[in-house]
Amino acid sequence: MTRLDKLLADAGAGSRSQVKEYIRRGRITVNGQICKKPEQKVQEEKDLICLDGQRVEYARYRYYMLHKPRGVITATEDSRDKTVLDLLGGVDTAHIFPVGRLDKDTEGLLLLTNDGELAHRLLSPRRHVDKCYLVRTEKPLSEADLRALETGVDIGDDKPALPAKAQLNETGDLLLTIQEGRYHQVKRMLQAVDNRVLYLKRLSFGSLELPEDLRPGEFRPLTDEEQERLRNDVKG
Ligand code: URA
């Protein structure tokens, strides 16, 4: 059982305060009866909930993109540090988890969902989902370093890193696209070419790109189109 206002907000009918207002104004019915109590317990599978006579479709799966700031850890709970779930203000975070992991000092695009099946596919090494990072390095990278990253460097595991795409942008930062997600992978790849990461930001994950207007610490639900494109990234 869930509170009516929470269910409506989670279903995308409006923000928590907007849906409370709808309820107060008598625009919401539960099984045909106007309900003016935001705290009313309802069951999404059983109760027919309408806004202005239109059925509110409750999505079983929810997807959010977060611009993870530095200093926050990619976990669902922690006794000391703020976690990425703490940043999803107003969202019912039960069963929501981050898809993959960004280090505490990494910022950028992080997907969060309760869709375990899609998350599993996106993270599967067999699927080769691209992740693009902006990397600021301690020392300038040479052409030979870029070629080494593109060939596949030894990062101390059984197998070398898969070939990556490596190019410098106009400010000399590295744009590195990898298809794996091994522990500290980008940092270890840069170590392998005798360098060090000073700043790391994830710009994209599969077809999802970090929007320029999403500031560090901000999040938003994925659009239907973004969800569809992500499913296409791992189809088959
Ligand atoms: N590679 C890293 O080394 N750290 C991250 O956070 C992501 C990729």
Image (cartoon, rainbow, N blue to C red):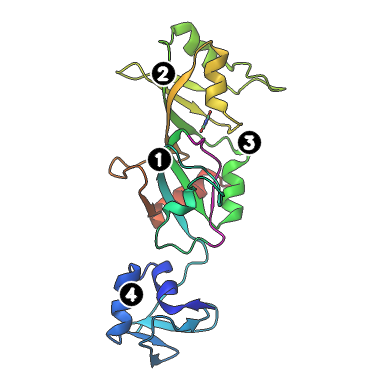
Kind of residue at badge 1:
Pro
Mark 3 and mark 4 lie on one chain; the one further toward the N terminus is: 4
Q: Are marks 2 and 1 in contact (CB under 8 Å)?
A: no
Q: Is residue 87 above or below residue 233?
A: below
Q: Residues within 10 Å of mark 1 (few under 14, many from 20)?
A: many
Between circles 2 and 1, the one closer to the viewer is 1
Mark 3 and mark 2 lie on one chain; the one further toward the N terminus is: 3
What's the CA distance linking mark 3 and mark 4? 41 Å
Name which residue lies at 33% across and 77% down. Answer: 20
Q: Are marks 4 and 2 in contact (CB under 8 Å)?
A: no
Say the numbered circle drawn on residue 125.
3
Of residues 70 and 214, the one drawn nearer to the viewer in this rendering: 70
Please state the horizontal and vertical placement of residue 91, each as a whole percent of the image.
43, 62
Identify the residue position indicated by label 4 in the image: 19
Which structural element holds mark 1? loop
Which structural element holds mark 2? strand
Please state the horizontal and vertical placement of residue 65, each as a whole percent of the image.
42, 49
Kind of residue at badge 4:
Val
Q: Is residue 7 left or right of residue 97?
A: left
Q: Is mark 2 within 8 Å of ligand 1?
A: no
Between circles 4 and 2, the one closer to the viewer is 4
Kind of residue at badge 2:
Gln
Identify the residue position indicated by label 2 in the image: 167
Identify the residue position indicated by label 1 in the image: 69
Q: Are marks 3 and 2 in contact (CB under 8 Å)?
A: no
Please state the horizontal and vertical placement of residue 228, each as a whole percent of the image.
45, 53
Q: Is residue 224 above or below residue 70?
A: below
Q: Is residue 67 above or below residue 147?
A: below
Please state the horizontal and vertical placement of residue 7, each as a whole percent of the image.
44, 73
Asked if residue 236 shows in the view, the reply is no
Mark 4 and mark 2 lie on one chain; the one further toward the N terminus is: 4
**What residue range appears in magenta?**
94-104
